[in-house]
Image (spheres, rainbow, N blue to C red):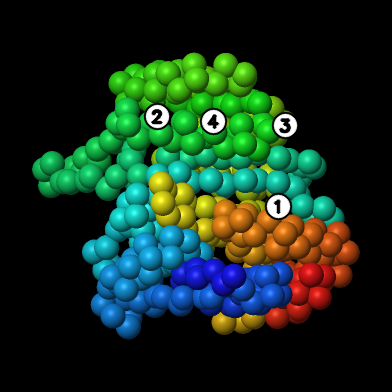
């Protein structure tokens, strides 16, 4: 059975890591994925005058699953973040970012890290409600609703249950923002009552950051609001060696968009040295989402084998391999 999936190659190093991901996934699935290629970001803006063309949105809605390379919002274009626009346009309310140590990676400061960041994806300060009150003074509104709070917390609890995890941390800043953060925490308390078999801790965001720096094993599944989740997910990536190793997904009721958490890296774009592992691991998540568990296991196994051998690694991982070389190594491992 063939599976149609929207592919957005992206900007900067996006086309390079996307090509690597496609090669690895095609090898793992025997070519069962049908790639529906679409544009978004700066590349789309240059060709169509739009950051998010209607054809791209319709493709994602039609296929229900997409994977994308990093996207760039043109500076001075007047557009807000293209990534935020995609999440809000498709109501991809849950940002899921598993953070796990990979074998053989000597540049990581910690071992056996196994965390999951669950981030609310549509509200908070990233809702984009800004205006200039008077010249020189800009006000940004933080939007928090009970509906969005409860559904992201429920997503996190259900994910933990399905993955066999028992410990959940709800991170907050109620001391500073008692109403907005208080609503989020109150919503979490309500949902937690439905999962009495889970250990649930309510911890100040500041303390969670310090805990992770001291001992990453102190937390398991962490549920946060939009801005805090954005910050914490990058910190967690640093625990395992950087953004080049961490996958991500944006999930809604009927649609999911998978992505690497890193940016477009324009300083190395076109040089053929970008690390594609983050997007390849995002594809592993995508394959599990569509029920291709065997293919996902093959992708994961190939990444772990190449990392363990340590002979074909890109520069950010301490090696000298090109994107093409590590792609061939991963395909050969499969």
Which numbered disc, 1 or 4, marks the residue that appears first in the sequence? 4
Q: Is residue 230 above or below residue 46?
A: above
Which numbered disc, 2 or 1, marks the residue that appears first in the sequence? 2
| Comparing labels 3 and 4, the label whose residue is closer to the camera | 4
Image quadrant holding the N terminus, namely: bottom right
Q: Which residue is mark 4?
A: 157
- Give the structural element (helix, strand or loop) at label 3: helix
- Label tally: 4
Residue 145 locus on image (x, y percent)? 30, 31
Q: Residue at x 88, y 64 (%)?
A: 309
Residue 139 locus on image (x, y percent)? 21, 40
Name the residue nearer the viewer: 224 or 209: 224
- Give the structural element (helix, strand or loop) at label 4: helix
- Give the structural element (helix, strand or loop) at label 1: loop
The CA span between labels 3 and 4 is 19 Å
Residue 327 locus on image (x, y percent)? 72, 75
The CA span between labels 3 and 1 is 16 Å
Residue 320 locus on image (x, y percent)? 78, 74
Q: Residue at x 42, y 39 (%)?
A: 120
Q: Which residue is mark 2?
A: 150
Marks 3 and 1 in Cβ contact (< 8 Å): no
Name the residue nearer the viewer: 52 or 12: 52
| Comparing labels 1 and 4, the label whose residue is closer to the camera | 4
Marks 3 and 2 in Cβ contact (< 8 Å): no
Which numbered disc, 2 or 4, marks the residue that appears first in the sequence? 2
Q: Which residue is mark 3?
A: 217
Q: Is residue 193 above or below residue 88?
A: above
Q: Residues within 10 Å of mark 4 (few under 14, many from 20)?
A: many
Which numbered disc, 3 or 4, marks the residue that appears first in the sequence? 4
Q: Which mark is residue 241?
A: 1
The CA span between labels 1 and 4 is 27 Å
């Amino acid at each position: 059975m063939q599976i149609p999936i929207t592919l957005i190659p992206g900007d900067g190093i996006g086309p390079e890591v996307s090509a690597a991901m496609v090669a690895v996934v095609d090898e793992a699935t025997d070519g069962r994925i049908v790639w529906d290629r679409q544009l978004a970001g700066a590349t789309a803006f240059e060709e169509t005058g739009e950051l998010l063309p209607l054809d791209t949105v319709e493709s994602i809605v039609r296929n229900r699953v997409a994977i994308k390379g990093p996207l760039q919002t043109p500076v001075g274009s007047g557009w807000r973040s293209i990534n935020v626009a995609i999440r809000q346009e498709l109501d991809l309310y849950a940002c899921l970012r598993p953070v796990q140590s990979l074998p053989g990676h000597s540049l990581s400061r910690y071992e056996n890290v196994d965390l999951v960041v669950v981030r609310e994806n549509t509200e908070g300060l990233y809702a984009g409600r800004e205006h200039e009150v008077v010249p020189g003074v800009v006000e940004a509104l933080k939007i928090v609703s009970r509906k969005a709070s409860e559904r992201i917390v429920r997503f996190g609890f259900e994910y933990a249950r399905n993955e066999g995890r028992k410990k959940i941390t709800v991170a907050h800043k109620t001391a500073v923002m008692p109403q907005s953060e208080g609503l989020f925490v109150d919503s979490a308390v309500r949902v937690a009552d439905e999962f009495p078999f889970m250990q649930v801790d309510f911890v100040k965001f500041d303390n969670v950051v310090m805990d992770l720096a001291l001992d990453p094993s102190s937390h398991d599944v962490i549920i946060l609001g939009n801005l805090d989740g954005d910050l914490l997910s990058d910190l967690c990536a640093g625990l395992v060696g950087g953004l080049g190793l961490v996958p991500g997904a944006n999930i809604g009721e009927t649609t999911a968009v998978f992505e690497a958490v890193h940016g477009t890296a324009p300083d190395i774009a076109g040089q053929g040295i970008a690390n594609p592992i983050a997007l390849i691991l995002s594809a592993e998540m995508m394959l599990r989402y569509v029920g291709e568990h065997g293919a996902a296991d093959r992708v994961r196994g190939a990444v772990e084998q190449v990392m363990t051998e340590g002979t074909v690694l890109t520069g950010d991982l301490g090696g000298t391999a090109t994107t093409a070389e590590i792609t061939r190594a991963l395909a050969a491992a499969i």
